[in-house]
Image: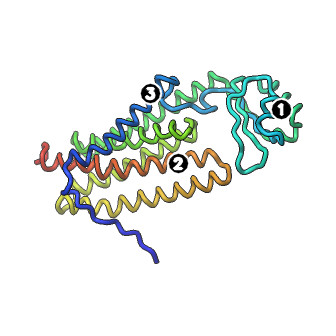
Amino acid sequence: MPSFEIPEVDFSRYSNRQLASVPLALIALALVVLVAWTVVFGHPVTPGFEFTGGTEITVQAAGGQPAIQQAFSAEITSIQPVRSQADTYIVTFQSTNLEQLTQSANAAFGAENVLSKQSVSPSFGASAQQTAVFGLGVAFAGMAIVVFALFRTLVPSGAVVVSALGDILVPMALMNVFGIKLSLGTVAALLMLIGYSVDSDILLTNHVLRRSGGFYESVDRAMKTGVTMTVTSLCAMAVMAVVAYLFGIDLMASIGIILVFGLATDLVNTYMLNLSLLRWYKYEGVAR
């Protein structure tokens, strides 16, 4: 039966600056991407249909995208093929006139080929976006409060919070790079990342500060549990993303990809950034 062995890493070979430089560079690069995206497009992450408002119609069109372009007089925002169904497309409009757009689709392709339709008003979409972002902020703030209450020391608690923040910022930046839009589903993925990331960080911090044994012995014990847990979750999310992509379930694929990004980032942040801050705190900071 195959087993997953966590190799021992000699962290003493690397200075705190060397360990922290890689995750801090990733976080800085993510911030640059998010700020640039905000300046150019007005949002740090491109909002999806649920947050911008508009109309979405799924049609079967044998003529493909050219036939869809000719069928509607309203401006088309995007045409996305459905991979699991031949000649099927999700057509998005900025207009919220669902009745008129449905009539155009029925006339061009037949009512039996209009598979689904929905409309979201811009005001409702903006309200949903504000609620989702507020919920994400409240969840992160609540996590930070719990962490500070748990350890009651600035540096270890701050290390957990900064590491968790990086686990959110990097996937958000990669969402823009890979064309994944912000929706209720992807917001849920970001909320899941808060739980995943803080779990491994608390595990490491608790082993170092509250368990018996030397620093590197405690780190090794924490890694055997934490890395196994994170890599297992990462592999499961990767499989989910691939399967969902093959079957054309775009939302599940997007959630899986975001979680893969976040969990991979969590490994770097936990065992480089958080570890370097804990080592500084224990040997050079106020805990010496």
Q: Which type of secondary structure does the marked residue at label 3 adopt?
A: helix
Q: Is residue 99 above or below residue 283?
A: above
Report, in whole angstroms, how far the alpha carbon at label 1 lies from the one at label 3.
Answer: 38 Å
If you read the primary sequence from the N terminus, does the residue marked by circle 1 or circle 2 appear first? Answer: 1
Q: CA distance from mark 1 to mark 2?
A: 33 Å
Which residue, as the protein is rendered here, is positioned at the far bottom? 1
Quadrant in the rendering for residue 56: top right
Give percent across and percent down for residue 60. Answer: 81, 42
- Residue located beneath label 3 in the image: 36
Q: Using the image, tell me which numbered label, if any, was put on residue 149.
A: none
**Residue 132 in the image, given as x and y percentages of width and height:** 52, 33
The residue shown at (61%, 44%) is 251
Instruction: Determine whether, in the image, residue 22 is placed left or right of residue 37.
Output: left
Amino acid, disc 1: Ala
Give the Cα separation between the discs numbered 2 and 3: 22 Å
- Kindly identify which residue carries mark 1: 105
Image coordinates of residue 79 in percent, x first then y, are 71, 35
Instruction: Give 170 or 228, whichever is nearer the viewer.
Output: 170
Q: Residue at x 57, y 25 (%)?
A: 127
Residue farthest left in this picture: 288
The residue under label 3 is which amino acid type? Answer: Ala
Using the image, determine if residue 175 lies above or below residue 233.
above
Mark 1 Cα shell of 10 Å, populated few (<14), some (14-19), many (≥20): many
Name the residue nearer the viewer: 273 or 221: 273
Which of the marked residues, 2 or 3, is nearer the chain's N terminus?
A: 3
- Residue position for label 2: 257
